[in-house]
Image (spheres, grey):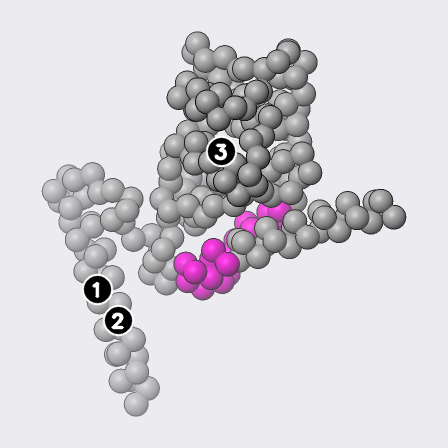
Amino acid sequence: MRALLIIEELKKLLPLMEKVYDMTWRKQINGEQVCNDEKLFSIYEQHTDIIVKGQREVKFGHKINLASGKSNLILSCEVLKGNPSDSKLYQNTIDKIVNDYKIVPRDSVTDGGYASKENSEYAQGKGIVNIVFNKIVGSLKNITSSRSMETRLKKWRSGIEAVISNLKRGYKLFRCNWKGEAHFKQKILWSVLAYNIRVMTAAVVAKL
């Protein structure tokens, strides 16, 4: 009976074995460039993406796009599919903040990866006054009301690294042990919710 159960479990893996075989044949024999969307990175967590590669250590999981504000609350959290470039995420994040909170932020400061002329112009069109990318290249310039405002926003962006580190370490976002894609997303969102509750609680206690 136990042997039959093992055989049934192995049969469930046959489609995955065929996918790995096909993927390997196409790349190694036919010399094709297989897209990441067609690759299988994990047998047991098939939703897994490759999110860091190249010169840095290869890591697997899902890319998370976060937006925070002056309060240090996490205002937006998206668990992404694939490994989209940061510059492709900027406009949707701005729209999400405006739609969710019914207010246009005065300032926007992000990593250099979000920088592009199109994103800067999009933020201006939305009515954002100060638009800062932490690192910019080429002819692109930050748009601010003053040099001191640009400096303040860059310092604030550096301080957000502490928020990200706190979220990762304090709420165990370095590794997710919850099974399945839906549970992966739930783990992320519950962790963000718990972090926000702690920030709000600390703000209330500070006023007592």
Q: Is mark 3 on a helix, strand or loop?
A: helix
Q: Within the image, what quadrant is residue 7 found in?
A: bottom left
CB-based contact (under 8 Å), mark 2 and mark 1: yes
Position in image of residue 200 (x %, y %)? 72, 48
Residue identified by numbered label 3: 94
* Residue name at image x 63 percent, y 23 percent: 153
Q: Type of residue at label 1?
A: Pro
The first of marks 1 and 3 along the sequence is: 1
Position in image of residue 97 (x %, y %)? 53, 38
Mark pair 2, 1: CA separation: 7 Å
Position in image of residue 140 (x %, y %)? 45, 13
Compared across the picture, whether 157 is left or right of 188 comes to right
The first of marks 2 and 3 along the sequence is: 2
* Residue name at image x 85 percent, y 44 percent: 207
Question: Badge 3: few (under 14), some or many (20 or more) residues near its Cα, within 10 Å?
Answer: many
Residue identified by numbered label 2: 12
In the image, 187 versus 206, the foreground residue is 206
* Residue name at image x 82 percent, y 49 percent: 205
Span colored in magenta: 167-186
Question: Badge 2: few (under 14), some or many (20 or more) residues near its Cα, within 10 Å?
Answer: few
Inspect the magenta stretch and tell me whether residue 176 lies in it: yes
Residue identified by numbered label 1: 15
* Residue name at image x 46 percent, y 36 percent: 95
Q: What element carries label 2?
A: helix
CB-based contact (under 8 Å), mark 2 and mark 3: no
Q: Type of residue at label 2?
A: Lys
* Residue 125 seen in the figure: yes
Mark pair 1, 3: CA separation: 41 Å
Relative vertical location of residue 188 with respect to residue 83 in this rendering, above or below = below
Q: Within the image, what quadrant is residue 55 found in?
A: top left
* Residue 113 seen in the figure: no
